[in-house]
Amino acid sequence: MIGATVRPQGTVPRWAVRAAHLIPLCTLPSGLWRVALVVGLAGHRGRMRPWDSAVILSLSVVSEALALLALGLVRPWGEVVPDWIPLLGGRRIPTMAAAVPAALGACAVTVIWTFAAVNSPDLANGAAGFHGPALWAIYVCYAPLLAWGPLLAAVTVAYHRRRSRPASGSAALRRDWPRR
């Protein structure tokens, strides 16, 4: 059955597609702010070592990449391994292989950014080297991250519900990955 195409299961709710597309937009302002910090446009009063710049830029890339993975919960590539991937192409992705990491991620980013928001008054005392408009820019750019976890949780629940319904149709729809 190599090369047999497995079709995605069920219809994705429109609200879930919109929510999944909002997730990368929630992480974008903070990522852009970190880029501005590295290039010296964020109002930081201090020098940054090259290693610090690399870590900050990597954090932006990794957070945006993780946010973009939410699109897999509403797109076919989150249900079926794309055909161009050797040996696994066309195989169905087990529901829990996507739902469990997504749910854990939703919990993690909710806890992380809620904790950061609750403890942000520590930032306001100026200890981090930000004052005035630069400090407000941090708040404005990081506030959307509070929505990341709840949006991801909602999209994950929709994914799990849709994929957990009994499959109808051919045996190819029920074929799971990896091969047995």
Image: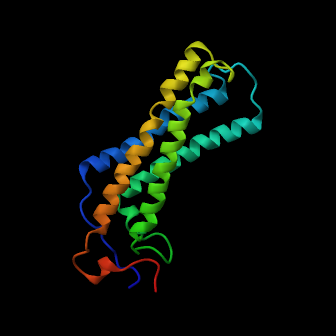
Count of marks placed on residues: 0
Percent across and percent down for residue 94 are: 41, 71
Q: Is residue 82 visible?
A: no
Which quadrant of the structure image shows residue 18?
top left
Give the residue displayed 51% in from the left and 43% down from the top: 111
Q: In the displayed orientation, state which residue is furthest to the top.
A: 132
Q: Quadrant of the N terminus?
A: bottom left
Taking depth in this image into account, of 76 and 152 the one nearest to the observer is 152
Which quadrant of the structure image shows residue 177?
bottom left
Q: Is residue 159 above or below residue 39?
A: below
Which quadrant of the structure image shows residue 128?
top right
Percent across and percent down for residue 137 are: 53, 21
What colour-coding does the image apply?
rainbow
Give the residue displayed 74% in from the left and 21% down from the top: 46
Q: Is residue 133 above or below residue 51?
A: above
Q: Is residue 7 left or right of residue 124?
A: left
Percent across and percent down for residue 89 are: 44, 73
Q: Is residue 87 above or below residue 58?
A: below
Give the residue displayed 68% in from the left and 41% down from the top: 55
Q: Is residue 110 visible?
A: yes
Q: Is residue 101 left or right of residue 9?
A: right
Taking depth in this image into account, of 153 and 39 the one nearest to the observer is 153
Q: Is residue 37 above or below residue 177?
A: above
Taking depth in this image into account, of 124 and 152 the one nearest to the observer is 124
Percent across and percent down for residue 70 are: 42, 52
